[in-house]
């Protein structure tokens, strides 16, 4: 059965943990979906993981549509959430609704995600009023990395923690169906989770959130440019891939690949007529 925003609401009500991973292509999405994940996030982290950017700021709406559509074709049951990239919603409420609509129509999203608190509540309300589910995102919001001065834990002072709580309540009031909390102290994330009627999805926010999300390449050991403290490697797939690539190179060079079973045949008389 296809999972929807109602899946998130029911999980919160029943106290069941939600699971979410990123994906950026059809094959990976199909594998993650087949494992039984609740949701797949087509994150603007594709800028780092797939496109080699140092941050997410260069990712475009067209990038998100391209990768989002591929993921949507592979995910038959998971809810597909597509990130709204930098400057696709901050400029105006009108731009936010138009770009969210494109992610739904062309990217085949089941929901969109955007970063920010009270400042983007008008966008959240307008997008949800248009019939598009919105997941909010607070804490370390990568699109604001220059304003933060780097990748730093958010909400550690009284003022910052109070603002996070207020922003969380505001995005819920604006209509968000869920809230991602990134790099937030565990106790603060627990407090926010207890105050909200909508589920929280943590990434570096402790075990008290209603669910968790990770970048799939991080948890599989495939992306080594930077490994955040909160990442647990559930497999060393990157090493397995490297070993396989080396084995392929060696087999081609020593002539052991391809073998006869990997080749196609032709009748000898056909070859003889070519001389």
Image (tube, rainbow, N blue to C red):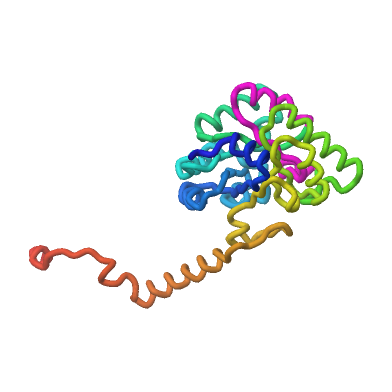
Q: Which residues are magenta?
A: 118-147
Q: How many marks?
A: 0
Q: Indicate whether residue 274 is drawn in magenta.
A: no
Q: Indicate whether residue 144 is drawn in magenta.
A: yes
Identified at 48% across, 52% down, the residue is 31
Q: Quadrant of residue 96?
A: top right
Instruction: Check the image and report above or below for 49 versus 2.
Output: below
* Quadrant occupied by the C terminus: bottom left
Residue lying furthest bottom? 254
Nearest to the observer: residue 37 or residue 162: 37
On the rendered structure, is 136 left or right of 254? right
Residue 107, percent across and down? 52, 35
Residue 195, percent across and down? 79, 38
Residue 260, percent across and down? 25, 71
Identified at 59% across, 49% down, the residue is 21
Residue lying furthest front? 14
Instruction: Check the image and report above or below for 241 versus 124.
Output: below
Residue 272, percent across and down? 9, 67
Instruction: Check the image and report above or below for 65 versus 27.
Output: above
Nearest to the observer: residue 238 or residue 133: 133
Q: Quadrant of residue 273?
A: bottom left
On the rendered structure, is 264 left or right of 58? left
Nearest to the observer: residue 267 or residue 126: 126
Identified at 54% across, 47% down, the residue is 24
Q: Main secondary structure of the magenta part?
A: helix
Q: Quadrant of residue 216?
A: bottom right
């Amino acid at each position: 059965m296809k999972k929807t925003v109602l899946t998130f609401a029911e999980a919160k009500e029943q106290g069941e943990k939600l699971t979410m991973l990123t994906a950026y292509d059809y094959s990976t999405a199909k594998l993650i979906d087949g494992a039984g994940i609740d949701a797949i996030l087509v994150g603007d982290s594709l800028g780092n993981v797939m496109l080699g950017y140092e941050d997410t700021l260069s990712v475009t709406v067209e990038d998100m549509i391209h990768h989002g559509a591929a993921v949507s074709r592979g995910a038959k049951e998971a809810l597909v959430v597509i990130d709204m990239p930098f400057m696709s919603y901050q400029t105006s409420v009108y731009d936010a609704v138009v770009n969210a609509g494109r992610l739904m129509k062309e990217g085949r999203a089941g929901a969109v995600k955007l970063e920010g608190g009270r400042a983007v509540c008008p966008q959240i309300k307008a997008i949800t009023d248009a019939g598009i589910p919105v997941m909010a995102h607070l804490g370390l919001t990568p699109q604001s990395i220059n304003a933060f001065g780097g990748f730093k834990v958010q909400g550690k002072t009284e003022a910052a923690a109070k603002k996070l709580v207020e922003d969380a309540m505001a995005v819920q009031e604006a209509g968000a169906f869920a809230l991602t909390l990134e790099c937030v102290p565990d106790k603060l994330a627990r407090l926010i989770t207890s105050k909200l009627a909508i589920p929280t999805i943590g990434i570096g926010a402790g075990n008290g959130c209603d669910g968790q999300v990770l970048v799939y390449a991080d948890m599989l050991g495939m992306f080594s440019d930077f490994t955040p403290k909160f990442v647990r490697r559930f497999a060393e797939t990157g090493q397995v891939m490297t070993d396989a690539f080396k084995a392929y190179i060696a087999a081609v060079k020593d002539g052991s690949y391809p073998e006869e079973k990997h080749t196609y045949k032709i009748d000898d008389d056909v070859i003889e007529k070519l001389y």
